[in-house]
Image (cartoon, rainbow, N blue to C red):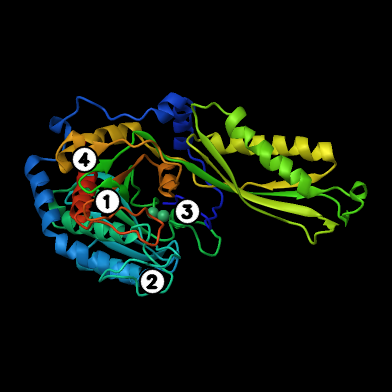
Amino acid sequence: MKPECPNARYGSIDRSVHYHARTMQLRSPLLALIVFLPVGAGAQDISVPEPMRQRVAQQAAALRPRLVEVRRDIHRHPELGFREIRTAKLVADRLRALKFDEVREQVGVTGVVGVLRGGRPGKVVGVRADMDALPIPELIEVPYKSTVANVKHACGHDGHVSIGLGVAEVLAGMRAEIPGTVVFLFQPAEEGDPDGGKSGAERMLEAGVFAGPAPTAIFGLHVMPTLQVGTIGVNVGAAMASSNRFTLTIVGKKTHAAYPHTGIDPVVIAAQVVSALQTIPSRMNNAAEPIVLSIGTINGGNRFNIIADQVVLTGTVRTLSQDGPERVRALIERVTRGITEASGATFTLDFPAGNPVTFNDPTLASASVPVLAEVMGGRDRLTSPPPQMGAEDFALYQQKIPGLFFFLGVGNTEKKITAMIHTEYFDMDEDALPLGVRALTSVTLDYLFRK
Ligand SMILES: [Zn+2]
Ligand SMILES: [Zn+2]
């Protein structure tokens, strides 16, 4: 998950039929933005047999010591994207020990895929956990402090791996009764390729993780310190924003600064462009459909008394609709063209495909709400936070098949666990780990048992 996403870069995206189907739903700003949880649904809408639900609860709770141990082990040894060698080995060894039917390593560079076939015929479902850490120093004093300088599990993916393995263990223990197959995706490089290439989800998809057995739905979660432990945040529809980076180069004509009329000054033009681009969100966009357009860097010029030859601007665009990025790209181009043409300058705009909106399939999400409510001990333990302007490459899976991505509360104000993800001080209340296992196991099983 990328609240800031300073380094991530993404390649092109294969747009599937699902993409277009859900584009239509998202075009309505009301559908995209009004977050709601279905009312009226209750325990009677859960398809997993009651005794099995109780066993999931008991086993998830019993796993707590192991979940903490695994999370702390990974936390001590954080690995950046596509370098998750130790973490991937730990995962693959564990899945083999659990007698998984298939364990594939080095999928999408360092990913691990595990296939667990149930004892009864049924659907195929995916469960995803991301494994990478961030280039951020650890500044909290804890027994499990990172042993790697300037690398920290600051996005909680250590917790995701621990929870994913917990789900694997609970399901492996009841495999004879499971109708269908569970495909586990332990994914590298959710935060993007440190070397500027494609992100982990894209590489996993290219490696054929959905080719066979082919899941028809996928579930994932993210720890969230802004939610108290014991609560879950779930969105029906848009959960997180699309994210695109762009590079805008304004080309002028270099000359002596004392004779500006003999050149074309890209610094003055860039100043106009920066101001004018802000009219895209404020004047050209429907206020009911939020977008963010931020210029992060401006670089240009050679010397105080030389008119520069070019200025390079980089920035990011966030939207909550599937067609938002292309709409904003076209407007950036139009605004920049008008200003540069008026001044006699030229420009280039590089706007590669990015992460689409993390969009929770309404049918899948609505059906999972009663399950999550039961797991957490009541509907009042579920919140539906406003869609975040951060982004998540889980969205790439959701373009292929319906998916649900929800937020697991790991904050605890009494224990002073409040630091945001992607900060040096981030930590999680480990009481959330068994809850995460129970929640993720339960929605996965419910999908398999649902007719
Ligand atoms: Zn992150
Ligand atoms: Zn994350």
- Answer yes or no: disc 2 within 8 Å of ligand 2: no
Q: What element carries label 3?
A: helix
Which amino acid type is shown beneath numbered disc 4? Leu
Labelled pair 4, 3 in contact (Cβ < 8 Å) = no
At 63% across and 51% down in the image, what residue appears? 314
Residue for badge 2: 85
Q: How far apart are marks 3 and 1 (CA)?
A: 30 Å
Mark 3 CB near ligand 2 (8 Å cut): no
C-alpha separation, residue under disc 4 versus residue under disc 2:
33 Å
Number of on-image labels: 4
The disc labelled 1 sits on which kind of residue?
Gly
Which residue sits furthest left?
51
Front label number (1 vs 2): 1
> Which label sits on residue 372?
4
- Which comes before the other along the chain, label 3 or label 2? 2
* Mark pair 3, 2: CA separation: 19 Å
Q: Can residue 99 be seen in this view?
A: no
Q: Mark 1 points at which residue?
A: 411
Q: Which of marks 4 and 2 is nearer the N terminus?
A: 2
Quadrant location of the C terminus in the rendered image: top left
The residue wearing badge 3 is 202
Q: Nearer the viewer, residue 435 or 292?
A: 292
Q: Are marks 3 and 2 in contact (CB under 8 Å)?
A: no
Q: Is residue 310 visible?
A: yes
Sequence-first disc among 1 and 4: 4
What residue is rendered at 77% in x and 49% in y? Answer: 267
Q: How far apart are marks 1 and 2 (CA)?
A: 29 Å
Q: Which comes sooner in the sequence, label 3 or label 1? A: 3
Distance Cα–Cα, label 4 vs label 3: 28 Å
- Asked if the residue under mark 2 is in contact with the one under mark 1, i.e. CB atoms within 8 Å, the reply is no
Name the spot of residue 281 as percent of width and height, x first.
Answer: 58, 33
